[in-house]
Amino acid sequence: MNNKSTTIQLLLPQATDRFTTAASASRFAKAVLHRSLLGSGLVVMAVLLTGCNGKKASDQTPSDSTAPSAETTPSATPPADAAVAEKLEGMGLKLERTKNAEVAAVNCLGIEVDDAMAETLAQLSSVKKLTLNQSKMTLQGWKQLGKLKTLEHLDLRDCSLDNDQLAAIAAEMPLLRSLRLNGKSGATSVDDDGLAVLKNMPQLKVLSADYLWVSEDGLAHLAKPEQLSELYLAKTLVDDTSLEFIAGLTGLKKARLAQSSISSEGLKLLEKLPLEDLDISECSQLDDASMSSVGKMTTLKRLNLWRVALTDEGIAHLANLNNLEWLNLDNTRLSDAGVAYLSGMTKLKFLHLGSTSVSDAGLDALHPLTNLKDLKVTRTAVTAAGVEAVEQAIPGVSVQLEYIEGE
């Protein structure tokens, strides 16, 4: 028998996804079922709710609360990596420095990093953050980058990257606090097996793995799951079983579970987490009953329900979320009656009611929201008169009535 790992490619609507024979058969079956459920759910939603004016979850950049460590005091001694920094800038890379001129961050976005560049990058002595999205590196190049033991933040979203290459760069980075991956373009093929690198990251607080074939099996590699604060898993293999694991992430504040196969039963598991930011947009198995659990997450400041099959009955469950500052109800079946349930959310700064049946009459319920800065009512029954009434009631609010393609 040939012991070499073989690769099976599944040609799916948005990306080429890969599994190796090392992955279990159950994971493969789960993946196929997951895509099937998503497809059928979205077809129904497309019939009911055409058009949208909100950003997809996958298009939003995770909030970067992971800036390099505090700047050090000035030093008269030239930094050891000054020559290296000069060479890197000559290659077109963007550098951020501390007060004593040491390189703290390197941004390679738009630059095709090759093995020679990687070898130069590996000479940096104190870099904390590395960002790249294109590469022509061989495995040897990735191994060179693996020498950057001082890294705290590693952003490899949309890199051409497989499990072996991820292991080459990230297998031994004990100081890493954030790891960002994304498979939307199809270039990244990391799966649960690739996430084995997490076991060597005891400081990790932020993990982004949108659009990858990952599940609770990959998350199980986390060295200290209780300290994870941000988790981004849009359009992955996440389902209710995955939520059983995620419920144990007791420090989790931000979660993106968009376009996944979670249900009302799964959401119940998350009720006690200290969540402040939850994205469950385009989850086709969620409905009005699901909002009962969401309504108990009173620490929420940001909630994305874009293209969830909600009516006024579901919105009623959200009435006590008085800490919300950002709410997206675009492409739901909200009516004027449902808007009344939002009147107590006085901390709201952003509200998206696009592609609903809301009219001028419904907007009257928003007048108490004096902190509102951005209101979107595109593709609704709202008229210019309704917009004017809101603007008079809430000084400084910006109301968008006209739909702009691509927003």
Image (spheres, grey):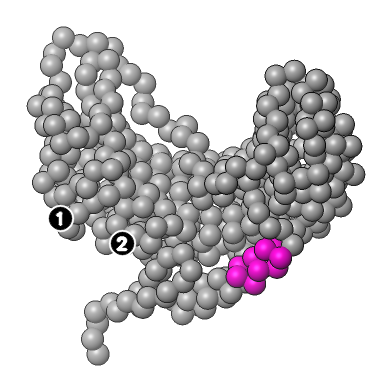
Q: In what element is the residue under mark 1?
A: helix
Q: Is residue 376 visible?
A: no
Instruction: Compare marks 2 and 1 and give the one earlier in the sequence.
Output: 1
Does residue 147 sit above or below 323 in this rendering? below
Q: Quadrant of the N terminus?
A: bottom left
Comparing 79 with 150, the one in front is 79
- Which range is magenta? 38-47
Q: Which residue is mark 1?
A: 140
Instruction: Identify the residue at horizontal 22%, vertical 35% (top origin).
Output: 93
Q: Which residue is mark 2?
A: 162
Give coordinates of residue 45: x percent, y percent.
69, 63
Q: Quadrant of the C terminus?
A: top right
Q: Residues within 10 Å of mark 2 (few under 14, many from 20)?
A: some
Q: Amino acid at mark 1?
A: Gln
Give coordinates of residue 137: x percent, y percent.
18, 54
Does residue 312 sit above or below 93 in this rendering? below
Judge whether residue 121 is colored magenta: no
Give coordinates of residue 81: x percent, y percent.
14, 27
Q: Amino acid at mark 2?
A: Asp
Between the C-alphas of marks 2 and 1, the distance is 14 Å
Instruction: Identify the residue at horizontal 13%, vertical 32% (top origin).
Output: 90
Q: In the picture provided, is 123 more to the left or to the right than 35?
A: left
Q: Residues within 10 Å of mark 1 (few under 14, many from 20)?
A: some
Judge whether residue 45 is colored magenta: yes
Give coordinates of residue 14: x percent, y percent.
46, 64
Instruction: Identify the residue at horizontal 45%, vertical 53% (top origin).
Output: 209
The reply to whether callout 2 and callout 1 are in contact (CB within 8 Å) is no
